[in-house]
Every structure is written in structure tokens, then in C-alpha cells.
Amino acid sequence: MTKKSISSIAKTDTYTSLSTFSSVNEMNLALQHYQIKFDAELTNTEKTVLVTLSHYSCIYPGVSFLRKRKIGELVGKSRRTIIRVCNRLETLGIIRQYSLKRESDLLQTVNAIVILPTDNDTEPQLTQHVTPAPANFVTPKSLIILKQKKEIKNTYIPKTPYDKFKERAACFISNKKIIQTLYGIYLAQTVLLKTAFDSEDILHSGLQSLTITLQATKQKTIRNLPGYFSGTLKKLLKELYFTTLHELGWNEKTASTPIGTPADNQAYTLETFISQ
């Protein structure tokens, strides 16, 4: 599926305009409708992803801002699987994905995933198995969870990229100088990518490269650990580059040579480019 062009700024007014429901209860009714209508068509993974999206769509009813990788962590699937699932749900008319720009620098930021309202004309009779609320208003459980998460977030001190890098490396080595050397290589290879890719994606590639490198030391003798890490990181950054192209709609079978690759007669694919 071809990605939509980036046309909206990530800010409160945009989130409000994207909201498709007047309340969380209305969104839950739509979710129940889709679960009944597409019960035979959706896989268990697709059903789980849809429910997960609804759990994180309560502040602006129907609108969530979860990264594909985060959704994957929540449901136990890979980022690529989540991309396919979201595209499938969009094809069925259950959700819509919107690309957004950061207001500060107009660069791409986290996409908004919006659960769409149902067609009232075809909506089946839905039975809500919920005990009527008493006269005194009871806060919905979903909102209580959101409030608790917000409180935890406010008291949490986020780790820096170096903290995460050092924590991952400490599982294998204790030499601080080696860790600093490897982190320096990571910074050198990614310093020019910060304006082109999401910082979390870049850090993920760095941490994954570190894990691959350090696990390799358990299986064989590596004489040049920094060099091995540098080569591994280079390959994973190339994977990130091509993954981003695919998400933006680039097709290696029909498109010309990707931006940033040598312009010759060779037919470039993700596998051949990474193997160089």
C-alpha cells in the first residue's frame, strides 16, 4: 500500500480534528461492531492489534500515536508484521493511518492511527454486557489506566542513549573504555542521520548491532571488536534506509535506483545492497 503524503502538523488541534468518536464508549461500540463483522476474516494477530490500538486511543477517542515497534512489543510481533497488519486493517476500512510532521522542524514524526466509525446503516444489533452505572459517575477503567500511566511518566527519569548503550554492553563486557569506543563509532556513523530518521529507530539499530557483535564474541574469536561492530552497524543502518523507503512507497521492482546509491546499471535490491 502506498503511503499517504505528509500533510498534517502534530499538535493538539490536529489530534482533536482526527478524533472520530465523541467518547470512549462510542469507540468501544465501533470496536465491537468490527469484531463481529470481520470475525471470520481477521487473524488473531490482527484482532489483538486492533484491541491494543483501542486501549491507547482514549485521550482523543479513536486516535493513537503508538510506533509500529511499540505495538510489536505489546503484542509480541515484529515491526514488519505490525506494518502489514495495519495496512490490512486500513484496507478493510477499520483504521486509517496519517503521516504527521513535527511542528518544530517539519520533519516526519510518529504516525497517527485512527479507528474509523462504523456505517450506522449496516451496524448490527450490539449487546453491551455491562452493568448500568449508578447515579454517581464511575470513571471508566480505561481512563484510570491512562491516568496511572501519566503519573508514572511524570516521575520517570528517561535514560539517555548512552545509558541504554552502556546497559546493553554491560551484559557482556565491563571495560568502560571499550564501551566508550563502541559508542563513539555509533555516534560517528549516525550523526548525519538524525535529521533523516527517527532517533528511536537509529538507536534501535545501534543497540541491535551491539548485541550482535557481543554475542558473536561468545561464538568465535574477534580480533578487532570495534571494526566488527562498525561493519555490523553499517549493515543495519542500510536496512533502516531501505525499510524507510519501502514504508514511503518505494518499490525496488518498478522504481529507479534509490536515493543515495551509486547510479550504475546494477539492479539494486535490499539484499544485494546490504551484502556489499
Image (cartoon, grey):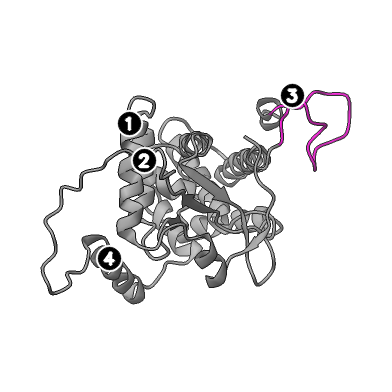
In reply to whether residue 164 is colored magenta, the answer given is no
Give me the residue at 77% from left, 26% from top.
254
Q: CA distance from mark 4 to mark 3?
A: 47 Å
**Residue found at the very far front of the displayed protein:** 121
Contact (Cβ within 8 Å) of mark 3 with mark 2: no
Question: In the picture, residue 240 is in which quadrant?
Answer: top right
Residue at mark 3: 253
- Closer to the N terminus: mark 1 or mark 2? 1
In reply to whether residue 256 is colored magenta, the answer given is yes
Pointer 3 local density, CA inside 10 Å: few below 14, some 14–19, many at least 20 = few
Q: Is residue 211 visible?
A: yes
* Magenta segment: 250-269
Give me the residue at 15% from left, 52% from top.
130
Residue at mark 4: 143
Q: CA distance from mark 3 to mark 2?
A: 41 Å
Q: Nearer the viewer, residue 184 or 276?
A: 276
Residue at mark 1: 44
Secondary structure state at the residue bearing disc 1: helix
Secondary structure state at the residue bearing disc 2: loop
Q: CA distance from mark 1 to mark 3?
A: 32 Å
Q: Position of residue 124 (x, y in %)?
A: 32, 38
Q: Nearer the viewer, residue 55 or 40?
A: 40
Q: CA distance from mark 4 to mark 2?
A: 26 Å
Secondary structure state at the residue bearing disc 4: helix
* Callout 4 amino acid: Leu
Task: Please tell me whether mark 4 or mark 3 is closer to you in this view.
Answer: 4
* Callout 1 amino acid: Asn
